Amino acid sequence: MRSSIIGRHFCVKCNEQRDHVRFGRRIEPSKTPDTTFIWAEFWACDHCGNHLEKREERSWPTDRDMITKRLLKVATDYAQVKASHLEVRPAKIVLTLELHPWHIVEVLRRVEAAHPTGFYRASDLYRLEQYGVLRCPLDENRMFPRRSPTRQERKSSYLLG
Ligand SMILES: [Zn+2]
């Protein structure tokens, strides 16, 4: 079942605030189509079914908005990214990425692939311990580190169910 979008709006027929269900939305041209658009939403009162149209003029995203969005993706798209910091200033955007060494990424992938079987290469675990990503000493460690999945991996695991 698709979940509906519910919003609280004033219904002229009921003459009071009511829950409304959104049944449509679209972009319409504004008077200044180069810089803005009209965001139109169509709602129906959950109580009496009366229709309500809401229109709002919004600005198209700027290049700065698009760049920020794209850079945010970089941080989650690559397994080698250990930490990221994005600083957005009026005329400058600074993305700082802290990276795992590539050989550690390879070890993390092998350890991950071994999770279902529970058989790990001792040399892999040793290297992770040396690198400092095992929280407990090797012989007491029960929780092996997992890197967060990349966007691509999340997408494919979602598609595969
Ligand atoms: Zn109503």
Image (tube, rainbow, N blue to C red):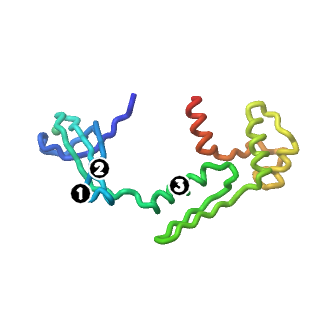
Q: Percent x, y for residue 59?
A: 34, 58
Q: List x then y, in percent, for residue 69.
A: 50, 55
Amino acid marked by disc 3: Arg
Image depth: mark 2 or mark 1 in front: 1
Q: Is residue 108 left or right of residue 4?
A: right
Q: Is residue 32 left or right of residue 93?
A: left
Residue 144 picture location, percent across and down: 74, 43
Tag 3's secondary structure? helix
Whereabouts is ligand 1, in terms of quadrant?
top left
Q: What SS does tag 2 mark?
A: strand
Mark number, residue 159: none
Relative to 120, is 161 above or below? above
Kindly identify the residue that appears in the image at 24 percent across and 50 percent down. 55
* Placement of the C terminus among the 4 image quadrants: top right
**Residue depicted at 82% across the width and 34% down the height:** 119
The Cα–Cα distance between marks 2 and 1, rounded to whole angstroms, is 13 Å
Q: Which residue is mark 1?
A: 31
Lower position in the chain sequence, tag 2 or tag 1: 1
Q: CA distance from mark 3 to mark 1?
A: 29 Å
58 up-or-down from 23: above or below? below
**Residue 24 at what x, y percent from top left?**
29, 38
Q: Amino acid at mark 1?
A: Lys
Provide the residue designation for mark 2.
Answer: 39
Tell me the kind of residue under disc 2.
Answer: Trp
**Looking at the image, is 83 positioned above or below residue 28?**
below
Which residue is identified by label 3?
A: 70
Check whether the beta carbons of the residues at disc 2 and disc 1 lie within 8 A of each other. no
